[in-house]
Image: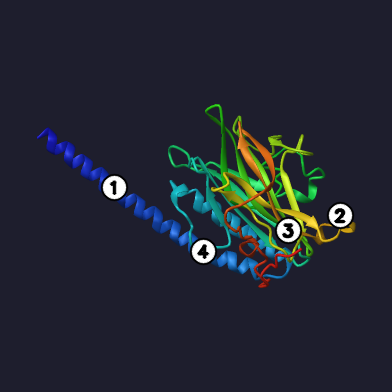
């Protein structure tokens, strides 16, 4: 009799759990449909104030969706205008997106959602303060975020612990140049911290993040390469020496550099050789109103 009761209890818990998961997924699917409509509407608005207001409604709806218990496990896979990436250790995920403005600039939005034991919402809103950050090298937090649309998270371990994560992101910039960024994320005393002096190499002492800027019509590779065992990127250079410092004239010179993770730090490796061709990803992170395929040239 006791065994039968245990069996029935397990069976009941299984059915209850399955029914709860189905209800959660149905609710989140409905939110996802609303978010898709709001996102498309926002991108199609030309007026800046109206666009920002519509995005505010999108943010409010997204937060309401994330408040649903165990929403961390819902992928929002049909919501194409947002990048949603999980850390490899499944401890958090980052949701990030941008709004293209009429002057060719961008406004970035995002949040870090933690994977909590009980499935309740723990969120770090990311507030883009790029315009107010006078020193792009400073260490900041989620309230003073150097905005970007992230597409890759790389955990870095040292001495058996995980001190920080590397984030690769597309930042856009102006009507003439594009930026990409290697950002450092860590968590300290319950706070999200962006930037850390973990880079080793010529002229890199004291660097808290790496920022690349180049001609908007070009593509730039910035990604992990498993064959090389490092973060690899196009070496950017001006078309002519006289254009040094004028980033609208920068593009790939067809060579590659990289950062190798050594003892918990990122050590610069210059002029590396890659086994396979590496393709740029700018076409996946471009102004949705612009349909030109980036041209990789020097």
Q: Quadrant of residue 206?
A: top right
Judge left or right: residue 134 versus residue 28: right
Q: Nearer the viewer, residue 200 or 19?
A: 200
**In the rendered structure, which disc, 1 or 3, sits on the residue that comes first in sequence?**
1
Give the alpha-carbon distance from disc 1 to disc 2, as whole Å. Answer: 65 Å
Q: Residue at x 62, y 46 (%)?
A: 231
The reply to whether dot 1 and dot 3 touch (C-beta < 8 Å) is no
Q: Is residue 65 left or right of residue 262?
A: left
**Image: 37 above or below 205:** below
Task: Mark 4 or mark 3: name the one nearer the start of the chain.
Answer: 4
Judging by the rendered image, the residue that carries numbered circle 2 is 244
Q: Are marks 4 and 3 in contact (CB under 8 Å)?
A: no
| Mark linked to residue 16 | 1
Which residue is label 4 attached to?
Answer: 34
Q: Is residue 20 left or right of residue 56?
A: left
- Judge by depth and name the residue closer to the eye, 253 or 137: 253
Label 4 secondary element? helix
Circles 1 and 2, Cβ within 8 Å, touching? The answer is no
In the depicted structure, whether residue 40 falls above or below residue 155: below
Residue 154 in view of the camera:
yes
Residue at the extreme right of the image, as rendered: 242
Residue 202: x and y in percent read 77, 38
Instruction: Determine which residue is flagged by label 3.
Output: 252
The mark found on residue 114 in the picture is none
């Amino acid at each position: 009799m006791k065994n039968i009761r245990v069996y029935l209890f397990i069976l009941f818990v299984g059915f209850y759990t399955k029914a709860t998961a189905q209800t959660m997924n149905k609710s989140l699917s409905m939110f996802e449909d609303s978010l898709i409509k709001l996102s498309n509407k926002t991108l199609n608005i030309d007026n800046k104030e109206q666009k920002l207001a519509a995005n505010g409604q999108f943010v409010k709806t997204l937060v309401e969706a994330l408040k649903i218990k165990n929403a961390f496990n819902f992928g929002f896979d049909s919501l194409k205008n947002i990048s949603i990436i999980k850390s490899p250790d499944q401890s958090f995920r980052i949701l990030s997106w941008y709004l293209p403005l009429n002057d060719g600039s961008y406004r970035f939005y995002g949040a870090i959602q933690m994977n909590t034991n009980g499935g309740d919402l723990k969120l770090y809103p990311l507030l883009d303060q790029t315009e107010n950050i006078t020193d792009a090298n400073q260490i900041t937090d989620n309230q003073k975020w150097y905005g970007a649309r992230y597409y890759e998270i790389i955990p870095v371990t040292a001495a058996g612990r995980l001190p920080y994560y590397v984030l690769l992101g597309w930042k856009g910039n102006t009507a003439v140049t594009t930026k990409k960024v290697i950002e450092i994320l860590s968590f300290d005393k319950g706070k999200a911290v962006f930037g850390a002096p973990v880079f080793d190499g010529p002229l890199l002492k004291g660097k808290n993040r790496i920022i690349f800027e180049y001609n908007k019509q070009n593509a730039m590779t910035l990604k992990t390469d498993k064959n090389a065992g490092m973060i690899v990127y196009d070496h950017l250079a001006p078309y002519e020496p006289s254009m040094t410092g004028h980033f609208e004239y920068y593009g790939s010179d067809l060579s590659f550099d990289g950062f190798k993770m050594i003892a918990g730090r990122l050590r610069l490796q210059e002029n590396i050789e890659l086994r396979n061709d590496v393709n740029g990803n700018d076409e996946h992170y471009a102004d949705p109103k612009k349909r030109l395929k980036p041209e990789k040239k020097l």
